[in-house]
Amino acid sequence: MRRVISLLAMITALLFASSSLTSSVNAQGSAYNTNFVTAITYQNVGSATANITFTFYPASGSPISVSRTLAANAGASLNVGTTTELSGFSGQGSAVISSDQPIVATIVQLPQSTTVRNRPLSNGFSSNDGSNSVLIATVLKNQFNQTTKFSVQNADTTSVNVTVKFFAVGSSTPTHQETFSLNVGTARFFDAGTIGALGSSFNGSVVVEATGKVVATAIEASVDSSYKVSAFEGVAQGSNTVYMPSALCNFGANQQRTAYAVQNSSNSNTANVTVTYKDLSNNTVATQGASIPPGAKASFLTCSASGIPTSGFNGSAIITSTGAPIVAIGKVSANPSIAPSFGTAFIGASGGAQKLAAPYVRWTQSRFDTNPGNRQRANIAIQNVGSGSSGTITVRYYDLNGVLIGTHTLGPIGPGQKANSNPISATLASGQTQDRLDEFGYVGGFGGSATIECANSGCQIVAVIRISSANSATSTANVVAEDYNAIPIN
C-alpha cells in the first residue's frame, strides 16, 4: 500500500502529448487516436509550505527542472502544455517530483479534441512503490472496441534492465515479450495497437520484470466513435484480498455497471477467486467465482452475478483468492444508448489507511451541463476495509491555498461497507460563503482537494474518487467520467 514520506520522490509514468500513431486498429477521430497533454495535480499533505521540484525526462535530450512552492493542505496543478519552463518540451516523457514536505499527485490527461471529453486519471507513485515486478491487470488490442497504451518507468537510482511479457486470457505462456534497458527516471512507451506479435486482436494482461525498481501506468482508449478513455496504475504485488469501493448494476440515470479484471500474480500457482458483493447496508447479496491460471486474468461482471438486483444496485465488493495472490482493476461503463462515452477505471485496494488524500476534487452546481466538459463534479466512494467499525468518517475540502472550505461528517460504517461524499454534502466552514462549495475548486482560484479520515483506533478505509463531466447540454444522463484512488497519507 502506498505511503507518503518527507523528502518524497514521487515517481510518475506519463504521456505528455502522445502522438497519433498509425495502426490497423486506429480509427479516425477515436479516443485512441487523440493527443493528450498532461497536467499534474498535486497536494501538500504536510504541516508546512512545501518546496517542490519537478524533473521532466523527455524521450531524448536532457532533463528539465521546474520549481514550485505549495502551502500546507493546498492543492495545485501544473499543466505541461502551458508551463513556461517547458515551452521546448513535446512528445512523450516521464517525471520525478521531489519535495521537503510529503506530497501526493494525480496525473490528469487533457484531450486535445472536441469529441473526446473525458480526462484519464492515474496516481503518481511514492519512492516506496517501485518494484522489480509490476502487474498490469488488463491490456487490450482491438478488444471490446478498445486498445491499451502503457508506460514503464525506471524508479531506481541506477539503470535497470526490463522484460515485458504479454499474457492472453487463460494462458500461462507469454504471447509476446520484449527486453530493454532504462536510465534513471526515463520511461518506455508501448502501444498494443502497433505490436504485430499480438495479432489482429488481444485480450490479456502484462507482467513487467526488472533488475531494479520500476513503475507503470496504462491508458485504455476506444478505437470507435464511442470516445471512451480511462487510465490506471500498474500494481507491484498481489494480495489474497482486494477491496472494490464501487459495485454497480444498472445504477443511476445512465445505468452504470461495474466489471473487474482480476489477474493472477503468481507465475506457478492457480488462483481460486471469489467476488462477494455487499449492498449499502452491508448485506451480502451475491458471489461469483473462477479459477485463474498463473499470470493470466479473468473478468467478473457485477450484473452477471446471481442474486444481484438488476435495477439500481449500488454497493461494494470484496475479491478474495486462495492458491495464489491477485491484483484487480475496476471498470465502470454505462448504457451505450444513454451515455456512449462513459467509461472509468480504478485499482482494487489490498489494504487501507486511517487517513487518505484526494488531490483532485471539483464541483459545479450551476455550470455542469451548460458548457459540457468545462466544469466537473467529484463524488467520493469510501469503503471500510478494516475488521471493525470505522468510527466517524470526516471528509475535509480545501481550496488551492489550503484553506478549509467545508467538512462532511459521516456516521460509522461496518467492515466491507461503503459511504459517499461530495463537496455540496459538506457543512460550510466558518467565514466561508456557499458559492465556495457550490463551485468548489473554481471560485477563488482554480484547484481543490480533500482529506478523508476515519476516527476509530486502527481503522482502515479506502476511497475512489469519480470525476464526471457533462457530455451533452440537453441530456443530463449523458456524461463521461473517470476514477482514481485516494492516496494513504499515514
Image: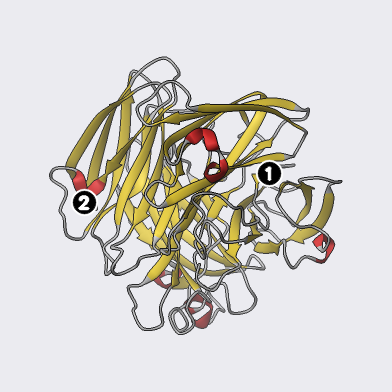
Numbered tag placed on residue 10 in the rendering: 1
Residue 277 x, y percent position in the rendering: 24, 43
Residue 411 x, y percent position in the rendering: 33, 56
Q: Closest to the observer: 241 or 147?
A: 147
* Mark 2 element type: loop
Visual colour scheme = secondary structure
Q: In which quarter of the image is residue 445?
A: bottom right
Residue 465 x, y percent position in the rendering: 45, 57
Q: Quadrant of residue 276?
A: top left
92 relative position to 478: left or right: right
Whether residue 406 is visible, yes or no, is yes
Foreground mark, 1 or 2, reads: 1
Q: In which quarter of the image is residue 416?
A: top left
Extreme residue in the left direction: 307
Residue at (20%, 60%) from the top-left corner? 312
271 relative position to 130: left or right: left
Of pointers 1 and 2, the one earlier in the residue sequence: 1
Whether residue 414 is visible, yes or no, is no
Numbered tag placed on residue 281 in the rendering: 2
